[in-house]
Image: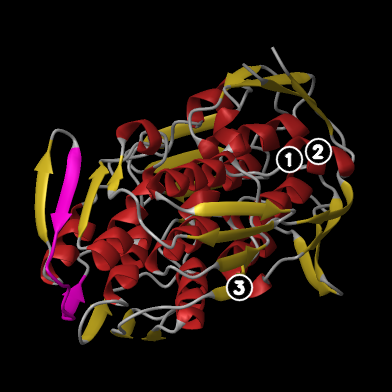
Amino acid sequence: MDKIVIQGGRRLAGTVAASGAKNAALPILVSSLLTGAQCTFHDVPDLVDVRTITRLLADLGSHIERNGTSLSISTPVIEKQEASYDLVKTMRASILVLGPLVARTGRARVSLPGGCAIGARPVNLHLKALQDLGAEIDLRDGYVEAVTKGLKGTDIYFDTSTVTGTENIMMAAVLARGTTVLKNAAREPEVENLAAVLNGMGAKIRGAGTDEIVIQGVQSLDSVEERIIPDRVEVGTYMIAAAITGGEIIIENCEPTHLEALTAKLREAGVAIEPCVGGITVSGVNGVSSADITTLPYPGFPTDLQAQMMALMTVGNGISVIRETVFENRFMHVNELMRMGADIAIDGNRAIVRGVRQLQGAPVMATDLRASASLVLAGLVAEGTTELDRVYHIDRGYERIEEKLSGLGADIRRVRE
């Protein structure tokens, strides 16, 4: 099993380019199931989760070709309507095939998904919405079975904001008869990116990026060629990397408007962030003060950057209170940060972080994708050597992270065991 070894204490400097967004790429690749025509997507990151979803698509009958960062997918015939447990168990986003399969073929059998253990994240909102559209749902032997003689548009209200639920039902509704209105829809940029792809295929969607999305169903969809948006979580992680090391870096291929909540908090903590040609410049040379954060659905502070921000606050000047309101059980990185000398106390969904003068390198273990990034960040600033085990988590969402950080001057390497 691989591990990442970091010798801390180096300030980062230089230029790094963000990859395409994992959380946008997964539903967009799945959307190709809605048409028999060829779909081409650019800036697709080479990640474990992307490879998993392409294996699942291939198992369903898709023909896939990769050329650099571009993927071409065609599914003239869906050969099977079942997503098996063996393919779905490692990634929750696999549930996204449910809506397209039901919409195009009238039937789907999809294993209940696995993935990072950061909370229940139930799929009941997906299933209720599909029932509202006219699908019959049955849960049996760990599988969701959905059958319909034809989906019909309706008004759907999500009890809580759900990104994958919004994406799943939006994909199902584009081939439904009539008009579907999604209320309390997720507003994330990844939802907007998916809507742009679907509209490029010939769908009629308006309101993506707001909490009400209106979908006028069409009979069929055609080919499309679109680009995946930059990964705002990867960009945010490198912004925090510059801050935690007291460095100064330029991040290219990013969309600053997608990170306004993080930018505001970093500036509150004393980090300088300025636009530049092709991206942004981030400087932490003046040190970091503590700042309180509360995770919220977009456009609030992203839960996917909570662990990384906590790593920064462990060396901040003062006390920070971090509230996690999106997922339960998303403080699993706390014990590992404390192994490195962090001063953190947990009180329900709050973490009280008292900044320390210096973290110490230590053997640590990744517990989920974003927790692994927080431990890498802590290792960059810690005194001595940090060894991070179970790095398969980080490979799910960060493309060549050790190479990119090494290019900025970090002493980081992957050790293959």
Label 3: how many Cα within 10 Å (few below 14, some 14–19, many 20+): some
Disc 1 from disc 3: Cα separation: 23 Å
Which residue corresponds to the image point at 72% horizontal and 50% vertical from the top-left? 238
Give, as a single range, the part of the protein colored magenta. 143-157
Residue 288 makes an appearance in the image: no
Badge 1 vs badge 2, beta-carbon distance below 8 Å: yes
Say above or below: 348 vs 148: above
> Which quadrant would residue 164 be assigned to in this image?
bottom left
In the rendering, which numbered label is found on residue 226? 3
Percent x, y for residue 37? 49, 70
In the rendering, which numbered label is found on residue 414? none
Label 1: how many Cα within 10 Å (few below 14, some 14–19, many 20+): some
Question: Which residue lies under the disc numbered 1?
Answer: 400
Disc 2 from disc 3: Cα separation: 27 Å
Question: Which residue lies under the disc numbered 2?
Answer: 403
Say above or below: 122 vs 276: above
Which of discs 1 and 3 lies nearer the camera? The answer is 3
